């Protein structure tokens, strides 16, 4: 697969959205007091359902943009590729915050989940900037800080809606 701007957009969007939303979800559920098995189950179900949803959205938006540019119906090859890249990127990245919960108690896993996700967001920002020939540090920090904001939202909602 050749790296195009559409594929790069799908990879960055899929990875960043997956990390941000999955770790936000897991943090909120963890803080709310559910058992680790429920946290893992919710994370895995979320990963696949949301990956498919994001893939469909990517396919539809790329197809619509191509048809708008051509002012007629066009073959959907690029849209299928963009949707597939989105799906794979989202699912793979979602396991970065989930994996900690598979190997340690929730009380410890949350911190590793958050840390690994923030590091991954920073790395994706740096790689994207490197490919685009832009400032690597500022892009990495921007992705990590914006992702951190989602984590905070998940923690706040989890704290407000605690079960026990």
Image (cartoon, rainbow, N blue to C red):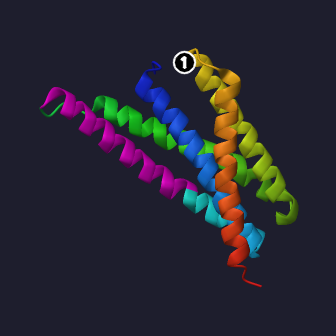
> Percent x, y for residue 151?
69, 56
Q: Which residue is mark 1?
A: 132
Number of marks drawn? 1
Q: The C terminus lies in which quarter of the figure? A: bottom right
Residue 39 appears in view: no
Q: Is residue 74 left or right of residue 125?
A: left
> In the image, is residue 24 above or below residue 118?
below
Residue at (82%, 50%) from the top-left corner?
112
Residue at 37%, 48% in the rendered image: 56
Residue extent of the magenta highlight: 47-71
Looking at the image, residue 65 sits to the left or right of residue 134; the answer is left
The image shows residue 37, relative to residue 21, as above or below, that is below
Main secondary structure type of the part rendered in magenta: helix
The answer to whether residue 65 is magenta is yes
Q: Residue at (32%, 36%) from the top-left corner?
A: 62
Residue at the far top: name it. 133
Q: Quadrant of residue 120?
A: top right
Question: Residue 47 placed where, x, y %?
Answer: 57, 54
Q: Is residue 134 left or right of residue 66?
A: right
Counting from the top left corner in percent of width and height, residue 37 is at 73, 69
Question: Residue 156 appears at what percent x and percent y?
Answer: 70, 67
Q: Nearer the viewer, residue 60 or 1?
A: 60
The extreme left residue here reads 72
Residue 107 in magenta stretch: no
């Amino acid at each position: 697969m050749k790296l195009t701007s559409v594929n790069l957009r799908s990879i960055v969007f899929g990875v960043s959205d997956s990390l941000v939303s999955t770790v936000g979800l897991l943090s909120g559920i963890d803080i709310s007091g559910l058992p680790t098995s429920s946290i893992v189950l919710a994370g895995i179900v979320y990963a696949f359902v949301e990956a498919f949803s994001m893939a469909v959205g990517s396919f539809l938006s790329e197809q619509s943009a191509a048809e708008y540019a051509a002012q007629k119906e066009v073959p959907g090859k690029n849209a299928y590729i963009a949707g597939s890249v989105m799906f794979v990127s989202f699912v793979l990245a979602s396991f970065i915050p989930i994996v900690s919960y598979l190997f340690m108690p929730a009380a410890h896993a949350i911190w590793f989940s958050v840390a690994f996700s923030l590091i991954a967001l920073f790395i994706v920002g740096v790689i994207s900037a490197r490919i685009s020939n832009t400032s690597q540090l500022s892009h990495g920090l921007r992705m990590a800080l914006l992702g951190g904001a989602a984590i905070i939202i998940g923690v706040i909602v989890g704290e407000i809606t605690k079960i026990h």
